[in-house]
Image (cartoon, grey):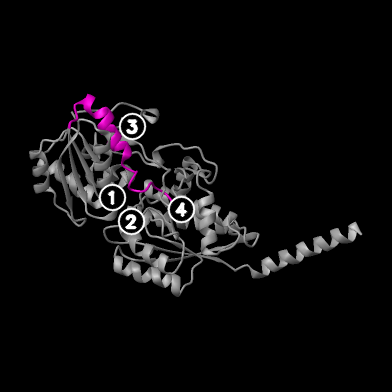
Amino acid sequence: MLKRVIAAFAVGLALASQALAADAPSEIKIGTLYASSGRYASISMPVHSAIKLWVEQKNAEGGVYVKAFDKKIPIKLVAYDDQSNTATAATLYNQLVTQDKVDLLVADSGSVLTAPAVTIARDHKMFLFDQTGTGASFFSKDNPYIALMADPVSTIWPKPIADFLTKDGPALGIKKVAILYSTNEFTGTQATAVRKFIKEANAPIEIVYDQGVPTETTNYTVILNNIRAAQPDAVIHLGYAPNDIAFLRNVQDVGIKFNMLFCIYPGLETELLEKNVGAKGLQHVFTYVPPSEMDYPVNFGMKMADYRKAWDKKYPDGKIEFGFNAVAGYTTALVIEKTLSVATSLDQMELRRAVFSLSGNLKTLDGTFALDEMGGQVGELTPLGQLQLNDHGHIKFVAVYPHDVATGKPVYPKP
């Protein structure tokens, strides 16, 4: 009798397995956008290139393992060029959902091009794999259709800067701070966070200049003279890569020397900034230390050194710079891969459950993946660093805060 029960059970398992295989799709469709031109191309193309690298790797192995069907399934990447235009992006996100009927929806890089996807994903009840869109307004308790993959939400990202200013700054002689920011979701939220952290710290730090300018700004000469007139001890400039390039070029052109200057993208896209500003123009600039300069412990995916080798093999001409965004795209891909390996179906809310189950447990080359209840990324924090010249005249990173990850002391004031 027992043998018959076991045999029947085995037959049942075999039939169930066959049914799963029969129901399995021939491919998993991942829909995304990228910007090959325009203001956001410099951050979008490395992210997109990283995802393509991952897709190529996985398909060479027969696809990704999908628990819902208990087998490897090839990936089809459905990708369209939004050309850095938000209206075009909105149309194309809608096309991915309603016409291409993708299984997973992935946003383009950055908050500006992510914003249209947030609304469309929510309206269509599609879970959005938000790669690097950190804007605070994207994450709310009444929107379960989003999670941030590869960088901290803007409300906490600048905390190392503010902590350095308020805790180490007074002893260095930093008492007055200027804040200049581009008025978009990404950098506007960071400016708000810097103000908040400084105020909460109750330190003897005064904000003597606080101004927002359009993201399209290309000439900062007048603005720089206005900042100089406020006589700040530290200047915080928050903008996208083209803003930082124009700002730092104008700093050199005008001949202004600030005792401390912070910019975002000398850290996030160092190769791009060094090409366009020059190593000497970046010397002593404070910035975020990207994961590409760290060696985080990994429990899934390639380590940084192996990933860099794979990147250089795939993109040997150097036209697409390796930096934070190249890591961000690969991190998103790893989260997707791990999600498919634990999700019991491709239902969008089950995908959400699977993503959130990774929080605090998944460790990639980008650091620890950790989400708050609204899908904001609260792991993967980037330390504060300062750029210096190495023996070959190129830029190197010196982490200066927090102290437990510091590799050197800050140079202040700038010589």
- Which mark identifies residue 401? 3
Residue 407, image x, y percentages: 36, 28
Asked if the stretch drawn in magenta spans residue 166, the answer is yes
**In front: 170, or 200?**
200
Tag 1 secondary structure: helix
Mark 1 and mark 3: Cα distance apart in space = 21 Å
Instruction: Check the image and report above or below for 244 versus 202.
Output: below
Labelled pair 2, 1 in contact (Cβ < 8 Å):
yes
Residue behind mark 2: 137
Q: What residue range appears in magenta? A: 148-175
- Within 10 Å of the Cα at label 2, are there few (<14), some (14-19), or many (20+) other Cα atoms? few
Real-space Cα separation, disc 2 to disc 1, in angstroms: 9 Å
Number of numbered discs on residues: 4
Label 1 sits on residue: 189
Which numbered disc, 1 or 3, marks the residue closer to the eye?
Answer: 1
One can see residue 322 in this view:
no
| Crowd around label 1: few <14 · some 14–19 · many ≥20 (10 Å) | many
**Image point 14% across, 35% down: which residue?**
232
